[in-house]
Image (cartoon, helix red, strand yellow):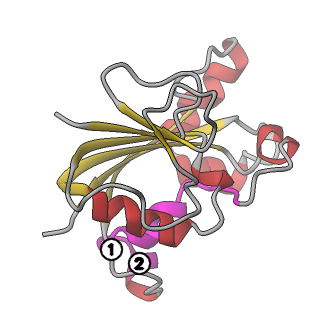
């Protein structure tokens, strides 16, 4: 199984091929992810991990199209980003984009947003969206994480401005044929 760690930095996922712009990183491939195409053939990867990198890229739609190109049909894509209500989304001046629970719905053909707005031809199924999956939370924050993960849209609409969480993890499946 071939795994790509997109923007791997110094924490490359074990067994993955790492790609990063920084020559001092753990990357196997040094490449600016804003420069398309990426230096990989079509349909190479079974899994792609993008841990806190998509928010730094110039064009999310073009980046997702490139991830579709280099991943196999049915490949799993894991994207971790700061939640748009989090202070971490805004504290870093290199962040260019902010994400909500439905940000990747634009690529999911089963979602009304994708049916209404045709920004791209590539399609990914959004399998699940999880708040603060990797973070250690205190008792109060854990209660909000549980609520947010059970009712993500309700949390986002009615509670997220009162008690913002920190990050989102999106699990996508490449639907290309």
1 left or right of 98 in image: left
Q: CA distance from mark 1 to mark 2?
A: 11 Å
User: Going 34% across and 81% down the picture, which residue do you hit?
Assistant: 121
Say whether residue 99 is magenta.
Answer: yes
How packed mark 1 is, by other alpha carbons closer than 10 Å (few <14, some 14-19, many 20 or more), is many
Q: Earlier in the sequence, mark 1 or mark 2?
A: 2
Image height check: is 24 above or below 98?
above
Q: Secondary structure at mark 2?
A: helix
Quarter location, residue 136: top right
Local secondary structure at mark 1: loop
Q: Which residues are magenta?
A: 97-114
Q: Choose mark 1 or mark 2, whichever is in front.
A: 1
Q: Residues within 10 Å of mark 2 (few under 14, many from 20)?
A: some
Question: What's the residue at 58%, 23% (across, down)?
Answer: 10
Q: Is residue 87 magenta?
A: no
- In the rendered image, which quarter is residue 81 located in? top right
**What label sits on residue 122 in the rendered view?**
1
Q: Is residue 19 left or right of residue 32?
A: left
Q: Position of residue 72 (x, y in %)?
A: 18, 55
Residue 114 to residue 34: above or below? below
């Amino acid at each position: 199984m071939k795994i790509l760690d997109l923007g791997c930095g110094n924490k490359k996922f074990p067994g993955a091929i790492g790609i990063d712009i920084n020559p001092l990183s753990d990357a196997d491939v040094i490449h600016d992810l804003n420069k398309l195409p990426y230096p990989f053939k079509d349909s190479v990867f079974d899994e792609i991990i993008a841990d806190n990198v998509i928010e730094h890229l110039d064009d999310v739609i073009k980046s997702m199209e490139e991830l579709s190109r280099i991943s196999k049909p049915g490949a799993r894509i894991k994207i971790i980003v700061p939640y748009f209500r989090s202070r971490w989304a805004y504290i870093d001046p290199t962040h260019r984009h902010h994400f909500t629970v439905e940000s990747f719905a634009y690529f999911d053909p089963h979602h009304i947003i994708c049916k209404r707005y045709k920004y791209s031809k590539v399609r990914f199924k959004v399998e699940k969206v999880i708040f603060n999956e990797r973070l250690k939370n205190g008792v109060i924050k854990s209660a909000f994480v549980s609520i947010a993960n059970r009712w993500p849209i309700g949390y986002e609409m009615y509670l997220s401005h009162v008690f913002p969480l920190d990050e989102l993890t999106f699990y996508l499946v490449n639907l290309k044929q």
